[in-house]
Amino acid sequence: MTSVIEVKSLRKVYSRTNKVAVDDVSFSVQEGECFGLLGPNGAGKTTTLEILQGLRKPTSGEITLFGYTWQKHETQLRGLMGGVMQHNNLYDKLKVKECVELFASFYQNYTPILELLERFNLLEKKDAWLSELSGGQKQRVFLAMAVVGQPRLVFLDEPTTGLDPTSRQDFWHIIKDLKESGTCILMTTHYMDEAEFLCDNLAIINSGKIIEAGRPNDIINRTFEAPIIKEPRKATLNDVFLKLTGSSISRESYA
Ligand SMILES: Nc1ncnc2c1ncn2[C@@H]1O[C@H](COP(=O)(O)OP(=O)(O)OP(=O)(O)O)[C@@H](O)[C@H]1O
Ligand SMILES: [Mg+2]
């Protein structure tokens, strides 16, 4: 497999506060993989994602994306990636279709806008202002913006925070489809079920340092010698929510 992302000894010190936000972080992400960065608030996840997206400069360390570096290949890199930023109300003065059109205009090839809006269940909202959407609908628009240019790498920073369980699972399936179409994903999440469902590999970051990394099951097996889960229940409260509110996704599909 080919590495899409190679990060070596990445370090970020915010100069105004002298805060060491990222401290000697190294990892790699392979072609077609969904890689998750997990960790408590303030661990350094967003900082890492912003540096990888070329939005912040690292203090030191080496980053290559598709074999390119931000210093030498900015134009090539912009065309290969898409992203959704955490806490984003930059686009409230645009309508849904305009937002996606704006992002499509950044790329040479893009998915037809109405087709994409239909896939993300946003067609009936195409002329709504972003400020008029619910949190979950907005998140779906951000994802549509991130993928409209058919990027080979997508950055998602807490993409499902605030989504209801049904929207979250709809989102999971969109991500699975993206992965199956060969898109590489780097995401953060505070939902461990989400990380288990979506991520092929994870890094757990704490106070700027990676404290554990690997495949979800391997990490679980390394961390606990004996099982700590007692007799399984027949369903979870999440399943109750999905059943009572009419979600089309059954538990089997994500077990
Ligand atoms: N612009 C900034 N200037 C100074 N310090 C910052 C800046 N942005 C973030 N930090 C600090 O860097 C550290 C890492 O922040 P970061 O946003 O990367 O964390 P995070 O892992 O994404 O957390 P969360 O889960 O809350 O989103 C925190 O201590 C934060 O206060
Ligand atoms: Mg963050």
Image: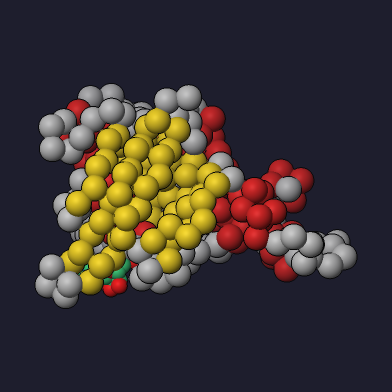
26 left or right of 243?
Answer: left
212 left or right of 18?
Answer: right
Viewer-side residue, 18 vs 143:
18
Residue 116, given in percent of the width and then of the height, sits at 41, 36
202 left or right of 220?
Answer: left
Question: From what the image shows, is residue 42 above or below residue 52?
Answer: below
Question: From what the image shows, is residue 31 above or below residue 97?
Answer: above
- Residue at left offset 13%, top offset 37%: 71
Question: From what the image shows, is residue 49 above or below residue 145?
Answer: below
Residue 35, given in percent of the width and then of the height, sits at 47, 44
Viewer-side residue, 239 vs 26:
26
Asked whether the viewer can see residue 135, the reply is: no
- Residue at left offset 77%, top offset 67%: 228
Residue 253, given in percent of the width and then of the height, sits at 71, 43
- Residue at left offset 55%, top offset 47%: 214
Residue 29, given in percent of the width and then of the height, sits at 43, 38
- Residue at left offset 34%, top offset 38%: 6
Viewer-side residue, 58 vs 200:
58
